[in-house]
Image (spheres, rainbow, N blue to C red):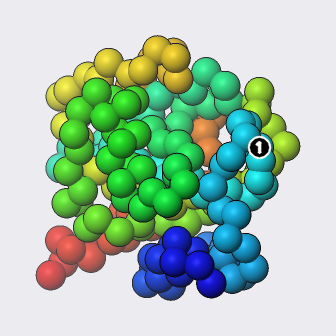
Amino acid sequence: MDPSSAHNAGLITAMESFDDLEQRHIEQALHWLAGTADIYRRIPPATPSPHLVSYVVLVDPDERGIYLGLHRKSGLHLPMGGHVEPFEQPLAAAQREGREELGVDLGFDVVGDGPLFLAVTPTVGKTAGHVDVSLWFVARGDRADQYDLDPDEFVGGRWWDLDPHGLPESDPHLGRFIRKLDTVLQSRIMR
């Protein structure tokens, strides 16, 4: 396994799965990484498929909010994020995407600077037809703040309640991510 794939496999191996589906996605991602060094998107929108993505989910844990943007290409309300560039670390990609899409430097102190969640997802919208292996990082936001999202990527954005019910049309795994995040946040309160 090449060094980039090995690093990413280490990040994924360190994750605790939330449910059976995430466990299957973790196993699928590890199998994929063991079989290829071609994990970065080289030709937009889809080559190779699958490829590695970092989501950066802006969360206000105190006011129980999640910030989503209306993504132009997919037509979905999504966290910020994007493709991991060749030889870039996924956390560095999440930091870069935060600066590019939100215009701010983000803190990753809500649950730590490792990915909280992993999903293997076929894409929809204008770039449908390939698979993203997405690492979901949690960044601290403030529900009182509004963000000037990159207008090339997003129509606009807003805060939503940190509740898997009542969310707009989004990534099919967002509700499961929120349930996992809430479990982690609640366990920290109990300590």
Q: Tell me which residue sits at (22%, 39%) in the image.
A: 105
Q: Is residue 154 above or below residue 191?
A: above
How far from the left and from the top, in percent, is residue 34?
69, 82
Q: Quadrant of residue 186?
A: bottom left
Residue placed at 51% from the left, 78% from the top? 3
Q: Is residue 157 left or right of residue 39?
A: left
Image quarter (top left, top right, bottom left or bottom right) of the C terminus: bottom left
Number of marks: 1
Q: Can you give x and y, in whole percent of width and height, for residue 139 in the image?
A: 29, 50
Q: Nearer the viewer, residue 41 or 30?
A: 41
Amino acid carrying label 1: it is Ala
Residue pushed farthest right?
Answer: 129
| Residue 33 image offset from top left, x and y in percent | 66, 76
Q: Is residue 187 left or right of residue 114?
A: left
Residue 179, position as x, y percentages in the image:
46, 62
Closest to the observer: 40 or 72? Answer: 40
Mark 1, residue position: 46
- Name the residue: 78% across, 55% down: 49
Viewer can see residue 27: no
Residue nearer the viewer, 162 or 127: 127
Left or right: residue 179 versus residue 172 is: left
How many neighbours does mark 1 have within 10 angstroms: few (below 14), some (14-19), or many (20 or more)?
A: some
Q: Residue at x 53, y 43 (%)?
A: 82
Under tag 1, what secondary structure?
Answer: loop
Of 125 and 166, the residue lying toward us: 125
Viewport quadrant of the N terminus:
bottom right
For residue 91, say whether it is visible: yes
